[in-house]
Image (cartoon, rainbow, N blue to C red):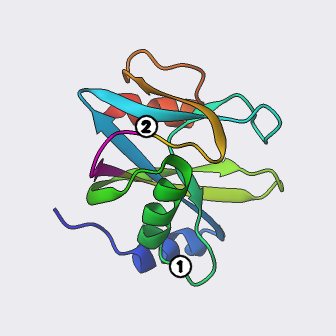
Amino acid sequence: MTLPSSADLAADAAATGITGFVAAAVISHHGHVLLVRRNPDDYMGGLWEIPSGTVENGESILDALHRETLEETGLTIDQVTDYIGHFDYTNSRGTTTRQFNFAVTVATTEPVVLTEHDAHQWALPGDLPEVSNAVRDLLTAA
């Protein structure tokens, strides 16, 4: 399986006027996917999401994927197995961000160490807690 390059993904997004990028990891384990819950006082507080974070200036999307997954969960990505698409959303500044979503494997699934969220759970794609419609569509399409 060949992953699209970070440069190609960024160029496609920029061609549509999108300049804010987020990299997100879909981490599966025994049919369940790892979800983390946003802190109540954050933008979209209380919403469950897949581990994700902002691609910094000068950083590739895949580099951000590895960094953000480790920062947010304490888990190290072993392999990026698939690019599973993107969705666009309005961020806290009122501009559009594109979230690039990748299926990944991790070296070990525990312990999950949260630094930016208040809870985590392993959920079945057909029995998700309160997630955005975009995340629900992403996780139930597979």
Mark 2 — residue?
138
Which residues are drawn in magenta? 103-111
Q: Specify the farthest residue to the bottom.
A: 58
- The x, y position of residue 53, in whole percent, is 59, 57
- The x, y position of residue 116, in whole percent, is 66, 46
Q: Which mark is residue 137?
A: none
Query: Which residue type does callout 1 highlight?
Result: Glu
Image quadrant where one finds the C terminus: top left
Rendered residue at 26%/26% (across/down): 31
Rendered residue at 49%/29% (across/down): 136
Q: Nearer the viewer, mark 1 or mark 2?
A: 1
Pick the front one: 39 or 113: 113
Query: Which residue type does callout 2 highlight?
Result: Leu
| For residue 34, above or below residue 92 | above
Pick the front one: 76 or 134: 76
Image quadrant where one finds the N terminus: bottom left
Reply yes or no: does residue 15 show up in magenta. Answer: no
Neighbour class for label 2 at 10 Å: few (<14), some, many (≥20)? some
Q: Specify the farthest residue to the top.
A: 127
- The x, y position of residue 70, in whole percent, is 47, 57
Q: Which mark is residue 59?
A: 1
Rendered residue at 46%/40% (across/down): 112
| 3D distance between C-alphas at marks 1 and 2 | 25 Å
